[in-house]
Image (spheres, rainbow, N blue to C red):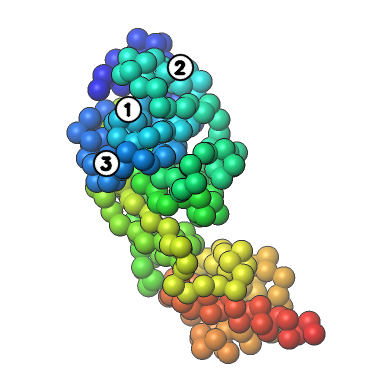
Amino acid sequence: MTSPKRLLNAWGLHPRKRLGQNFLADPSIADTIVSRAALLPEDIVFEIGAGLGALTIPIARAVKKVYAVEKDHGIADLLKTELLASKLSNVRIMEEDVLKIDIGERIDADGGKIIVVGNLPYNVSSQILVKLIASRKTIHRAILMFQEEFAQRLTAVEGGRDYGRLSVMLRYCSDIRTITSVRAAAFHPKPRIDSRVIEIRFLDTPQYLATDEAFLFSVIKAAFGKRRKTLKNALSNSTLPIDPATILTALESSGIDPSRRAETLTVQEFVALSDRLLEVERIEVS
């Protein structure tokens, strides 16, 4: 792997803070990630934020095809040159905003499911995760690198201060494990904190299946929208189109104390509450 700093200097390019560009500079880390990702020759990979190809190149050598998203035109041109030098022809570079790509329509997975890989910039990590959850019918699993503090939130369990909206959403529809940790010094430029690589393996069917998944996610978002408030107050003062009396009835009939806070609820309890809110609301309307 050529030094990112040397490559960028040769092309007259500079890391763009606005895009959260921190390029992996340690080839041993890339090899560890690819090895622990257990990629197969028949796999189709969708890479988010390909950058200078630190992961793209070893991944392309291990799988059938890589769709590499790189929004920065200058970096994408540099990546094309690196791929040519590595004699790799199974990578398609997509110079687009990943948030605007319809993964199901744009990625040809040959009848199977894709594997998503990426070193995600902190400022859009949440948006990308929500998008992947919504697109999970076409995704088998995701191997993603996050800043450590964000990774802690994703892997948190109920009862802790790190437990939040994304923790619940991921635990509803996936199994999560840590693949490896990456020190800040392994990047150029060096970020303020270390990173962690997480594997998200999406479930074919959630253990606790919600009647209306979109509504469940709305309830979760509303509950954590004012996380210092009790569930009754947080939900009553949210954008949910349900009156406080109905919310109180649903909480009590679900066996959930209205004075509890969102971070104390398990996934199972959120599903039960969501389903009960729908039932009570229909009764009230009828």
Q: Quadrant of the C terminus?
A: bottom right
Q: Which mark is residue 33?
A: 3
Alpha-carbon neighbours of circle 1 within 10 Å: few (<14), some, or many (≥20)? many
Q: Secondary structure at mark 2?
A: helix
Secondary element at image label 3 = helix
Q: Are marks 3 and 2 in contact (CB under 8 Å)?
A: no
Residue pointed to by mark 2:
77
The percent position of residue 170, horizontal first and vertical second, equals: 44, 60
Q: Are marks 1 and 3 in contact (CB under 8 Å)?
A: no
Q: Quadrant of residue 280?
A: bottom right
Mark nearest the camera among 2 and 1 is: 1
Which quadrant: the N terminus? top left
Residue sitting nearer the eye, 133 or 105: 105
Q: Is residue 12 above or below residue 20?
A: above
- Mark yes or no: residue 112 visible: yes
Indicate which disc, 3 or 2, sits on the residue closer to the N terminus.
3
Above-or-below relation of 237 to 40:
below
Residue 88: % across, % down: 35, 22
Q: Amino acid at mark 2?
A: Asp
- Mark closer to the chain start, 2 or 1: 1
Name the spot of residue 5 as percent of width and height, x first.
Answer: 30, 19
Q: Secondary structure at mark 1?
A: helix
Residue at numbered disc 1: 57
- Kind of residue sitting beneath label 3: Ile
Residue 94 shown left or right of residue 35 in the figure: right
Vertical comparison of 273 with 203: above or below: below
Say which residue appears at 61% left-offset and 70% top-offset.
Answer: 212
Viewer-proximal residue among 145 and 61? 61
